[in-house]
Amino acid sequence: MLPYQRYDYDLAFVGKGLWCRTPQEPTLAELRTNSWEAMSTALAVLTLILIVAFIFGIALGLFFRGRRKRGWLIAAGSFVAFVATFNVSMSVVDREAVDQGFLSASDRSAAKAAGYSDPATWQTKRAEVASASEKKSEPVAPTEIEQEITEVVAVAASKFGTDALSAYCDGYHKTIAVIREADDKFGIEGTDEKMDWINERDEAIGRQTEKAIGVPATEWLAIASAERWDQRCEGLARGWLLIEDADLLAAGDGDAHVVTRALQAAYEGKVKAGSGLPFSRYRSATCNWKELEGYHFAACTLTGGQNGFRSDPYLFFVGSKAGAPVIVPLDNDHMTEPSYRDIDTNKTVVPVGWYVGPQPFIPVPYTQIRALFE
C-alpha cells in the first residue's frame, strides 16, 4: 500500500501543584465570557432538542399513518431551526472572539496555534507569524554538503550488492515474526517483559545479519536507511517490482490504457468469484484512468451491492518500468498477485509494483486524486 505503509517498530537491528487566588469581583471581560458561555450552553441544549425533534418527526412520518403529515412538518421545521441555530452559533463564536480582542474565531484559533493567548500581543505578532509560515512553505534547495553526502552514500552502497539486501531482508522478516510472536504471547500492549523478550531475540538476529553481510552493522545501517531496504524487503517478499518516482513519471497514456484494462479484468474476475471482501459484496466493477500533474492514475469502483451501494474508488498509480506498464496500488492492499493479464490480449502480463521512497508519498493532494474519479 503506497502512501500509507506504516512501520510500527524500528527495525534497525541495534541491539502538581495547586494554586488559588483571593476571591474578588469579576471583571467586565469575565462577565462577558460568562455571558457567552451561558449562551453557548443554551444553544447546545437547543440544538440537542432540535435533533431529537427531527428524529421524532421522521419516526412519525414513517411509522404512524394518522400522524404522517404532522411528523413530516415537525421534521422539516426542526431541520430549518437547526440550520438557523447553527448559523447563530457560528455568529456567537465570532462575536465572543471579537469581544476578546481578536478579529474573528478563526483569528483566535490561529493565535492559539501560534502559542499566544493575549489579543494585544497577537496583533503585533500576527504579521511575523504569517511571514514565517510563508517562508517555511517555500522549497529549500539542498546544500552542496547534502548533495555530497547523498553521492557518498550512493557510492558506498554499491560495495554491498544484492547479497547484502537479501541477508538484511532475511533478518527483517525474522524480526517481524518475532514481534508478531510477542504480540501473541504477551498481548498488544507494550511491557518491560515483552520488550526484553523482543530485544533478546532481535540482538541475535542482528548478529546473524552482520555475519551474513560480512561487515559490522555500523558500516551498512546508514546505507540501509538511505536506500530504504525495509521497503524493498516488503516489495521483494510479495514478488512485486520495485518502483520509484521516476518510474511513475515515465508512464504515458498507452501505459494507462493497458493498466486500466488489466485492472478491469482483475476486478471483474474477483467480483464474479466472490473472492472475499470487498468483492463478495458487489456484482460488477468499472475502471478508468486520468492524468494529473504529470502522473497517471487509475481507479476501480465496485457497484451493484446491496441497496445499490457503490464502493469508494480504489486508486492506483500507473508506472512504467523498462518501457512496460506497471500497476502500483495507492490506497489499498487487496492486490495479492504479482501480475495481471491485459483483458484485450490475454497475453500481455502487467506486473504489480511496490513504491520505494519517502513516506507518506503523494505527489498531488489526495483529495484531488479522489475527486477525479467521483
Image (spheres, grey):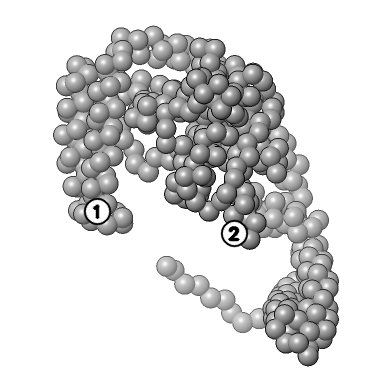
> To which quarter of the image does residue 299 belong?
top right
Give whichever of 359, 37 is nearer the camera.
Answer: 359
Q: In this view, does 15 lie above or below 183?
A: above
Q: Name the residue under label 1.
A: 184
Q: What element carries label 1?
A: helix
Q: Do the residues labelled 1 and 2 touch (CB within 8 Å)?
A: no
Q: Which of 248 and 345 is in front in this view?
A: 345
Residue 251, label in figure: none
Q: What residue type is labelled 1?
A: Asp
Q: Say few, some or many: other residues with alpha carbon within 10 Å of mark 2 (under 14 / 14 to 19 / 20 or more).
A: few
Q: Residue 48, can we see it?
A: yes
Q: How far apart are marks 1 and 2 (CA)?
A: 36 Å
The type of residue carrying mark 2 is Gln
Residue sitting at 59 percent across and 54 percent down?
305
Left or right: 67, with 179 as reference point: right
- Residue 41: name its quadrant: bottom right
Percent coordinates x, y for residue 172 in the rendering = 28, 32
Q: Is residue 287 above or below residue 87?
A: above
Q: In this view, does 262 lie to the left or right of 229?
A: right
Residue tagged 2: 306
Disc 1 residue crowd, few under 14, some 14–19, many 20+, Cα 10 Å: few
Residue 141 visible, this orientation: no
In the image, residue 107 sits, relative to residue 201, either above or below, namely: below
Residue 109 x, y percent position in the rendering: 69, 55
Quadrant, the C terminus: top right
Q: Which of 358 and 346 is in front in this view?
A: 346
Identify the residue at horizontal 78%, vertical 88% (top origin): 67
Q: Depth-wise, is mark 1 or mark 2 nearer the camera?
A: 2
- SS at badge 2: helix
